Image (spheres, rainbow, N blue to C red):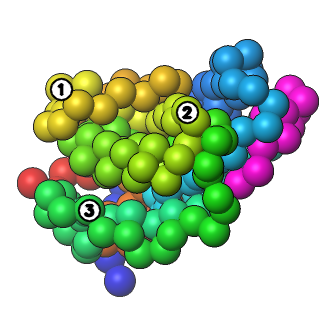
Amino acid sequence: MTEKRSIPVLFTAAEIKERVEAMAGEIAAKLPADFLIVSLLRGSFMFTADLVRELYAVGVHPQIDFMTLSSYGAGAQSSGNVAIGRDIADDVTGRTVLIVDDILETGRTLRYAHDLLIERGAADVKIAMLLEKPNKLEVAAKADFVGFSIPDKFVVGYGLDYANHYRELPFIGYLDVH
């Protein structure tokens, strides 16, 4: 187990809640009522849960499915290869799909998920991203809905982890792992 350490805070729980509420309104205004959320696990589980509750509060009732993709393993650097750990069960043919993910960094995972869903017949694929590092993209990828743009720091909390630790934090903080 990792030692307990003080984690510098980038966004408080209150700031996250406020932004997720606003994102739900943005999504509700732009997507059809019958869309499918595909949550990319594991880092986005808290964001997805809060977002679907806020969508419900504004009268939107999407279906929800989950996919596990990974390019990190247990480290702090992307391996560059995306692998499916768990696939969705729902058919996306002819559907509007909203990919919900935790962080847009290199763009590899997002590009892979987007292209896979289009290949499987999705009519439209939109992306809701909790965090983005605008200067880190290595492949063309763009989120339609973004919670926060962040500096190039290794972030943890609110579902994001380092070697599967820190996901439970109610805020988003950062570690010096370099």
Question: Which kind of residue does numbered mark 3 sit on?
Answer: Val
Distance from disc 1 to disc 3, alpha carbons, whole Å, reads 20 Å
Distance from disc 2 to disc 1, alpha carbons, whole Å, reads 26 Å
Q: Report whether residue 168 is seen.
A: no
Specify few, some or many for label 3: CA neighbours under 10 Å numbering under 14, 14-19, or 20 or more: some
Residue 135's mark?
1
Point out the frontmost of discs 2 and 1. Answer: 2
Corner quadrant of residue 59: top right
The residue labelled by disc 2 is: 124
Dot placed on the residue nearer the N-terminal end, 3 or 2: 3
Specify few, some or many for label 2: CA neighbours under 10 Å numbering under 14, 14-19, or 20 or more: some
For image coordinates 48% across by 24% down, the residue present is 144
Query: In this picture, which residue range is highlighted in magenta?
Result: 55-65
For image coordinates 61% across by 49% down, the residue present is 93
- Side (left or right) of 92 relative to 7: right
Residue 147 locus on image (x, y percent): 51, 28
The residue labelled by disc 3 is: 82
Residue 61 part of the magenta-drawn span: yes
Badge 1 marks a residue whose secondary structure is loop
Distance from disc 3 to disc 2, alpha carbons, whole Å, reads 22 Å
Badge 2 marks a residue whose secondary structure is strand
For image coordinates 42% across by 28% down, the residue present is 143
Name the one closer to the observer, 111 or 12: 111
- Side (left or right) of 108 relative to 142: left
For image coordinates 64% across by 31% down, the residue present is 20
Question: Which kind of residue does numbered mark 2 sit on?
Answer: Asp
Point out the frontmost of discs 1 and 3. Answer: 3
